Image: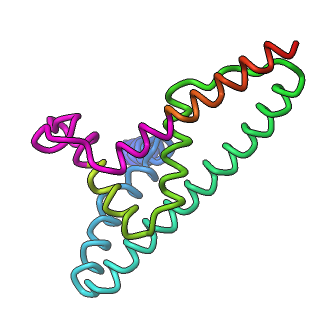
Amino acid sequence: HKCVEECRDREGRRDQRGRGGRARRMFDGTSARQARHIAGKYPKSSAAALVLGTVATCAVMVGAIEARDRLDATRRAAAGARGGGAATTPEEAQLRAMLENARESTWRENLENAADAQGRFMMPGGPAGGAGGGEAPGYVRRIEERSGEILRREDDDRRRRAEDE
């Protein structure tokens, strides 16, 4: 009788382990406690590691996006050479203008622009037009102007190609 209860108890524990028991143990908060302990014990090193990790992640993401954009541009150019080619949407033109603006700006200007854009567009309850509803900052105006130029240039090119045919 006692042996049967022990076997059932062992099977119950085995079932728990088999059904996410390991995952439950892995995410039981010990990692968060360890991270808090390390951050408390080594605050400068932890802050530096956090900043460097964030910068590295951003650099990888920007590199991946630029590689994808280059690939898309070559595909679009090949499709345009065949006489096809889809028109650039206003969102694509704005993205290209943002990338150009980021490449032409210093890292300090990029950080300031990113902080302003965060407060302007991503903060819940924040006004979409900017803090205080005032005039848009220079980088926003430059992006809007450049995206308009991109769209106009592409429309002109499309009209010229249509006239040549």
Question: Is the residue 9 above or below the residue 49 in the image?
Answer: above
Which residue in the rendered view is the most extreme toward the left?
132
**Is residue 73 toward the left or the right of residue 53 in the image?**
right
Horizontally, residue 83 falls left or right of residue 109, namely right
Give how far across and how far down residue 56 sits, in percent: 51, 68
Quadrant in the rendering for residue 72: top right
Residue 33 locus on image (x, y percent):
26, 69
Residue 3 visible in this rendered orientation of the protein: no
Residue at left offset 50%, top offset 29%: 91
Give the quadrant of the N terminus.
top left
Using the rendered image of the protein, determine whether residue 45 is visible from the camera's viewpoint: yes
Q: Is residue 142 above or below residue 76?
A: below
Residue span colored magenta: 119-147
Please tell me which residue is depicted at 14% across the width and 44% down the height of the picture: 131
Q: Quadrant of the C terminus?
A: top right
**34 or 117: nearer the eye?**
117
| Corner quadrant of residue 69 | top right
Q: Nearer the viewer, residue 73 or 136?
A: 136
Left or right of 86 in this view: 112: left
Residue drawn at x 62%, y 26% as measured from the top left: 88
Q: Position of residue 39 (x, y in %)?
A: 27, 78
State the residue at coordinates (81%, 18%): 84
Count of numbered labels shown in the rendering: 0
Which of the two residues, 128 or 63, is positioned nearer the viewer here? Answer: 128
User: What's the image's color scheme?
Assistant: rainbow
Q: Is residue 135 magenta?
A: yes
Residue 111 found in image quarter: bottom left
